[in-house]
């Protein structure tokens, strides 16, 4: 298929250019995002792509997203939809066709300065080849902790070989890029532990100003028949096996022994939903769990956050945990484990009470907030301040733009930029970029 109409919506000067190897200093950059997932599929990767592309556009840069067609999506400026195929064992997802992506090469030539790969599947495979063919720098974002993810979807294989496979694949893919973006310091440590030598840039997805627009909690409660004074615990996210959601169901069951009117609201969908419904019934709390599915981020999700009294989270696999910040932005007090990527969000101790991954201590933290409205309000207000002051989407986009400029102009992140590379092993050979050039990992 031809993607010409979508590309034609970009700047007119693209048409007359050849391969963009040395763009004029100071001019806006032209960035191509490749991803096997994007809206309407709701998850952290889609949210990150959307957040960065809009904030980069506000800075004057041009971002085009190449993503799968799910069926029936309206045309959108800057988004190119390609034919896709279903993913075995995961009916929500799609995967690009590699040949369709590579077939865009003639239309892409001269239009872009850099390729940013967002997923490690076909998008990565095709992105590496496109970058080589078009002689462009390649950067990737490491969004998913596959070492803790794969065994949930291929449980018939032993964990040890799967972990080794995930580590080797992550190492190889990172070494095919000029730089890798990681959303948290925890995953900087993880990838260095894998032996990754590529420059790593810790750069989370920030919160847009729209996340701070006050939701209407009372309206959400009316829509779903929730009494005004009923205590509500909320979890938002994909209903997936790796999210540790059976633990939260057990916590809710324990907390209901002290607060029998407690309601757990689960906002999201996913492959684990049928098993989670069965588990709630087994725990005797089927009538105390409200499954509301995916909610519109523009209004419904904000209302949902404001309708709750406490946000509960216990995923073991997050690279960042953006929903924690979304909850804080709505003055919703958080109880969470602090594991991997969520440690950065929770490190300041603002807006949250942390807990170990044990049912009764976690339930006690929830009850502590539910039973003390003053504490709950203070924690919620502190979280909103923390989210606004420390997690600005505009600031994160500025740092990403600085990284792009480093890669386009010098081939490597620099310590002088606002997006600096993390330390690399000093004895390691510098990895090759997709163009075949060698880059030097700098440290701060």
Image (cartoon, rainbow, N blue to C red):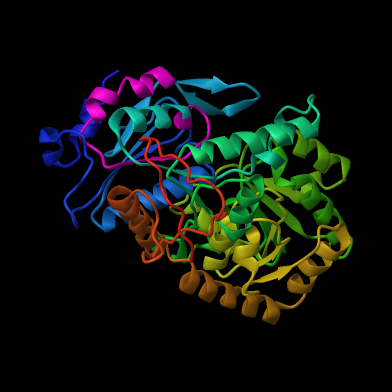
Q: Position of residue 113 (x, y in %)?
A: 27, 42
Task: Name the image quarter holding residue 38.
Answer: top left
Q: Is residue 398 visible?
A: yes
Q: Position of residue 241 (x, y in %)?
A: 72, 38
Q: Position of residue 259 (x, y in %)?
A: 83, 64
Q: Position of residue 47 (x, y in %)?
A: 47, 48
Task: Name the image quarter holding residue 26.
Answer: bottom left
In the figure, is residue 333 to the left or right of 114?
Answer: right
Q: Is 300 drawn above or below residue 45 in the view shown?
A: below
Please name the residue shown 35% across and 41% down the image: 137
Q: Is 352 drawn above or below residue 96 in the view shown?
A: below
Q: Nearer the viewer, residue 413 or 380?
A: 413
In the figure, is residue 14 to the left or right of 178?
Answer: left
Q: Nearer the viewer, residue 110 or 175?
A: 175
In the figure, is residue 92 to the left or right of 153?
Answer: left
Q: In the image, which residues are magenta?
A: 98-124
Quarter in which the N terminus is drawn: top left
* 430 in magenta: no
Q: Nearer the viewer, residue 306 or 403?
A: 403
């Amino acid at each position: 298929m031809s993607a010409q109409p979508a590309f034609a919506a970009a700047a007119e000067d693209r048409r007359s250019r050849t391969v963009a190897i040395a763009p004029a200093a100071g001019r806006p950059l032209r960035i191509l995002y490749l991803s096997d997932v994007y809206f309407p599929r709701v998850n952290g990767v889609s949210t990150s792509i959307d957040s960065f592309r809009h904030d980069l556009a506000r800075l004057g840069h041009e971002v085009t997203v190449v993503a799968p067609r799910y069926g029936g999506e309206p045309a959108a400026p800057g988004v190119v939809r390609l034919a896709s195929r279903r993913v075995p064992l995961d009916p929500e997802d799609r995967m690009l066709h590699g040949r369709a992506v590579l077939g865009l090469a003639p239309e892409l030539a001269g239009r872009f300065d850099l390729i940013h790969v967002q997923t490690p599947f076909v998008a990565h495979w095709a992105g590496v080849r496109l970058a080589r063919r078009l002689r462009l720098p390649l950067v990737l974002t490491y969004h998913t902790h596959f070492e803790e993810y794969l065994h949930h979807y291929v449980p018939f294989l032993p964990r040890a070989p799967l972990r080794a496979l995930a580590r080797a694949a992550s190492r190889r893919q990172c070494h095919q890029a000029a730089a890798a973006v990681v959303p948290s310091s925890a995953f900087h440590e993880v990838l260095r532990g894998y032996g990754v030598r590529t420059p790593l840039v810790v750069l989370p997805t920030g919160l847009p100003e729209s996340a701070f627009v006050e939701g209407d909690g009372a309206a959400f409660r009316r829509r779903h028949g929730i009494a005004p004074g009923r205590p509500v615990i909320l979890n938002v996210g994909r209903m997936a096996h790796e999210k540790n959601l059976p633990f939260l169901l057990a916590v809710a069951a324990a907390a209901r022994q002290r607060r029998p009117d407690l309601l757990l609201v689960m906002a999201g969908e996913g492959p684990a939903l049928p098993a989670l419904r069965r588990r709630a019934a087994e725990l005797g709390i089927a009538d105390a769990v409200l499954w509301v599915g995916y909610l519109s981020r523009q209004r419904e999700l904000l209302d949902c956050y404001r309708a709750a009294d406490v946000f509960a989270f216990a995923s073991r696999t997050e690279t960042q945990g953006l929903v924690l910040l979304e909850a804080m932005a709505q003055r919703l007090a958080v109880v969470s484990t602090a594991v991997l990527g969520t440690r950065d969000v929770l490190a300041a101790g603002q807006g949250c009470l942390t807990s170990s991954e044990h049912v009764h201590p976690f339930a006690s933290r929830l009850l502590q907030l539910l039973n003390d409205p003053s504490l709950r309000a203070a924690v919620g207000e502190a979280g909103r301040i923390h989210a606004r002051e420390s997690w600005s989407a505009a600031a994160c986009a500025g740092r990403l733009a600085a990284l792009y400029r480093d890669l386009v102009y010098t081939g490597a992140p620099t310590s002088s930029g606002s997006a600096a590379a993390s330390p690399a092993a000093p004895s390691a050979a510098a990895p090759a970029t997709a163009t075949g050039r060698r880059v030097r990992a700098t440290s701060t």
